Image (cartoon, rainbow, N blue to C red):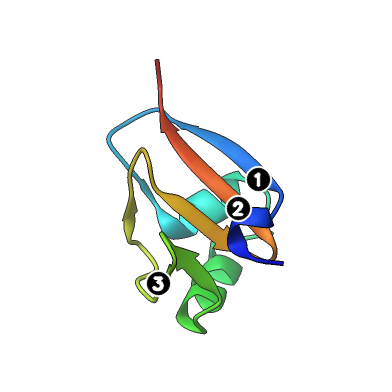
Amino acid sequence: MSASDAPFIPFTLRGEFIELDKLLKVCGLVDSGGAARHLISEGQVQVDGATELRKTAKIRAGQVVVFAGQRIEVAAAP
């Protein structure tokens, strides 16, 4: 399954950005921030099609995060 075929989770941003580890936790894809940071450091998360190793990368509206067969589409709050 390609990233574009993955089931997607819509996420509405409430500020300018959310840190990558927090996004995975808020979306319920990991049980803790520590687990998120570990998985990110192992290269298991992609942002906009590229592997992201920065645990606190700033994710902004319009970006797409893929992890564990799930696609998170980040949108700005109305």
User: 31 left or right of 20?
Assistant: right
Farthest left residue in view: 16
User: Which residue is label 3 attached to?
Assistant: 52
Amino acid type, label 3: Glu
Q: Are marks 2 and 1 in contact (CB under 8 Å)?
A: yes
Farthest top residue in view: 78
Please identify the quadrant where the C terminus is shown.
top left
**Mark with earlier residue (3, 1):** 1
> In 3D space, how far apart are the residues under numbered discs 3 and 1 (Cα atoms)?
19 Å
Amino acid type, label 2: Arg
Instruction: Classify residue 33 by image quadrant.
Output: bottom right
User: Which residue is label 1 attached to?
Assistant: 8
Circle 2 crowding by C-alpha within 10 Å: few under 14, some 14–19, many from 20: many
Circle 3 sits in a helix, a strand or a loop, which is it? loop
Taking the spot 58% from the left edge, 45% from the top edge, the residue there is: 26
Circle 1 sits in a helix, a strand or a loop, which is it? strand
The percent position of residue 13, horizontal first and vertical second, equals 42, 32
The percent position of residue 59, horizontal first and vertical second, equals 36, 50
Q: Are marks 2 and 3 in contact (CB under 8 Å)?
A: no
